[in-house]
Amino acid sequence: MPGNILITGGARSGKSRFAQEMAQETGRPVLFVATATAGDDEMRQRIAAHRESRPPDWKTLETPTHIGRQITANIGTADTVLVDCITLLVNNILMQHGDIEREGSDASMLEKEVNAEINELTKCMERNQAGFIIVTNEVGLGLVPANKAGRLYRDLLGRANQMLARYCDRVYLLVAGMPLLIKPDKTR
């Protein structure tokens, strides 16, 4: 699989399925990087279902943050790295800081952390010969969130998505399970 690919879209748009099919089609060793954490029973069930949906020969790396560093340390013989997903990665960074609704919470510090995480990932992509498939949600198409935390999350994820879209060779938008190629060339 040539290059690096970003797959975005709304919740339940088919992003993960599309990414997994794309990775499987390479016929090469795959490292699956999962960023989800199980905070409750429902999320544990979702994680278990995702695990079951992956081919048994794929190596899985579960890491909530510092994914670039973790991929570099665990890539092994993988020729394809599938990261699912940036949406939860940004959430994990925010959750490390507790109540971001309180007065005095530092949005610029959170933005620096998210940017550092994405920069670490793109540096990892540069250092490794593997092709990367990265899944993320597009959260900027709906209503403006009603609270500070929601707006901050939307803004941070939107900026992370922009950074990755500029870096990746191809970008797909998934709508109702249908992929639309929105960045078809290798310009950054």
Image: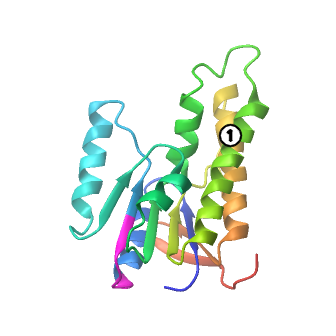
150 magenta-colored: no
Q: Give the residue drawn at x 43%, y 78%.
A: 79
Q: Is residue 84 at least partly visible in the picture? A: no
Residue 164 percent location from the top left of the image: 66, 63
Q: Give the residue drawn at x 32%, y 58%.
A: 60
Residue closest to the eye, 34 or 174: 34
The quadrant the C terminus occupies is: bottom right
Going by the numbered disc 1, the residue's amino acid type is Glu
Does residue 137 sit above or below 80 in this rendering? Answer: above
Q: Determine which residue is flagged by label 1.
A: 113
> Horizontally, is 30 left or right of 131 in the view?
left
Q: Residues within 10 Å of mark 1 (few under 14, many from 20)?
A: some
Residue 65 percent location from the top left of the image: 52, 44
Determine the secondary structure under disc 1: helix
Q: Give the residue drawn at x 77%, y 16%.
A: 104
Residue closest to the eye, 43 or 114: 114
Residue closest to the eye, 184 or 177: 184
Q: What segment is highlighted magenta in the picture?
A: 25-31
Q: Give the residue drawn at x 32%, y 30%.
A: 40
Indicate how the structure is coloured in the image. rainbow
29 magenta-colored: yes
